[in-house]
Image (cartoon, rainbow, N blue to C red):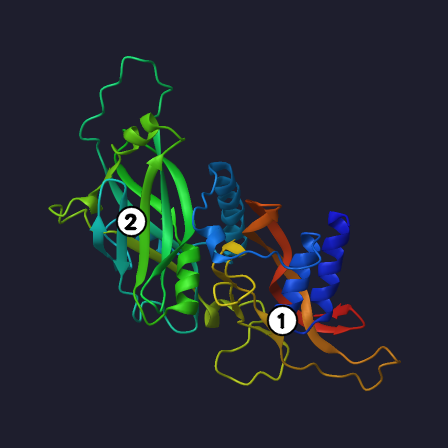
Amino acid sequence: MGVFAIWALCAVLFSTARCFSHEDMKEALLQKLDLNELPKIHKRDLENLVIPAHIKNKYLSMLRLHNKRRRRSLPSLAGILRGIPGNADISGEVMYSDTTRQRLVFDMEARIPDNSEVTMAELKLFKKAPRKLPVPEKRKHRPANNARVSIYWVEVLENGSNRTSLVDSRLVPIIETGWKSFDVSQAIHYWSKTQRKTPLYLEVWIEGERPGSYAAEMAKCVHFATQDPADKTLGKPELVLYTLNLEEYGSRGDCEPNKANDVCCREEYFINFRELTWTQYWIIEPAGYQAFRCAGGCKQPKRNYSYGERTCAVVESAPLPMMYLVKRGDYTEIEVAEFPNMIVEKCGCTMDNISIV
């Protein structure tokens, strides 16, 4: 089946359904991947899984575009002022730190205003000047001028173990000094839907810009102020939140929270891939996402001329980038793709698939 045919199938599936159920999503994913049944992937398939750099970069590129599409307003002046170091919404603490990895914790209680949406979130870390660059060995090395810094959201499971989800990654010049910003919007979205009663945990990983011992050794020269407990001024990680007041701006016909909605509108509907038995090992990233769904009724015309009943349905949708596993014989591989029509963008009243917004 061709890609355009699959997209058309998903579009029809989405436009005729009042809400996108788990079964609908399962069918759409199988159609997109041209599969007849779910791949038989088990927990042991993830034990020694290594995500290749090109796969990680492809997913992050799609994720950045996805986050950019979802931002429904430019940051306000207040948000810009908060983005100036020292004026962040939340200052975090460092739970532990070593040369290449550290965990940060943010107390998020009552930090996000009611009836508001986080459109963007930035983690700010101050990068210090390198203490001492390693002496090059006699044999020639390909230059390594950068280190890869990746940010992971840490999901604390009920059994006490942790699971991480990649939210941003970028190359940081080794010799530069100053504040570095990372997009952690996805981490805030995950936390707000799954673990809102607990603090937000983030991990910072510092790795070589490419495989090899020399690049890994050079990456150890990257040093953030959060790794220095004696630094009381720049040592705390900063979290900047850009929020959208849904009452002031409106929200593309979103339903009012905690109220019965008689008129067709879009309501929140979060899908947690970690809790679904058929996705918890198959889909690596994201951990979950806000799919939304349509709710409410539509006024019916006095005369419908046999066109049928007007129903509240999806009239605009958006894609979702995903990283998932595929089985090829005895081998398990990682792939990345953007799945169309996974997120409801707008709801409206339709009659025989004709949108009447």
| Residue 174 in sight in this render | no
- Residue occupying the point 19% across, 48% down: 235
Q: Position of residue 193 (x, y in %)?
A: 43, 68
Q: As drawn, which residue projects farthest toward the front?
A: 330
Residue 231 is left or right of residue 3, and the answer is left
Count of marks, rendered view:
2
* The C terminus: image quadrant: bottom right
- Dot 2 alpha-carbon crowd within 10 angstroms: few under 14, some 14 to 19, many 20 or more: few
Amino acid type, mark 1? Ser
Residue 84: numbered disc: 2
Q: Nearer the viewer, residue 220 or 176?
A: 220
Q: Position of residue 118 (x, y in %)?
A: 42, 62
The residue that mark 1 highlights is: 21
Residue 215 is left or right of residue 68, and the answer is left
Residue 188 is left or right of residue 351, and the answer is left
Q: Position of residue 308 (x, y in %)?
A: 83, 79
Q: As drawn, which residue projects farthest toward the left?
A: 230
Q: Nearer the viewer, residue 321 or 29?
A: 29
- Residue occupying the point 67% across, 74% down: 18
| Residue 172 in sight in this render | yes
- Dot 1 alpha-carbon crowd within 10 angstroms: few under 14, some 14 to 19, many 20 or more: some
Disc number lying in front (1 or 2): 1
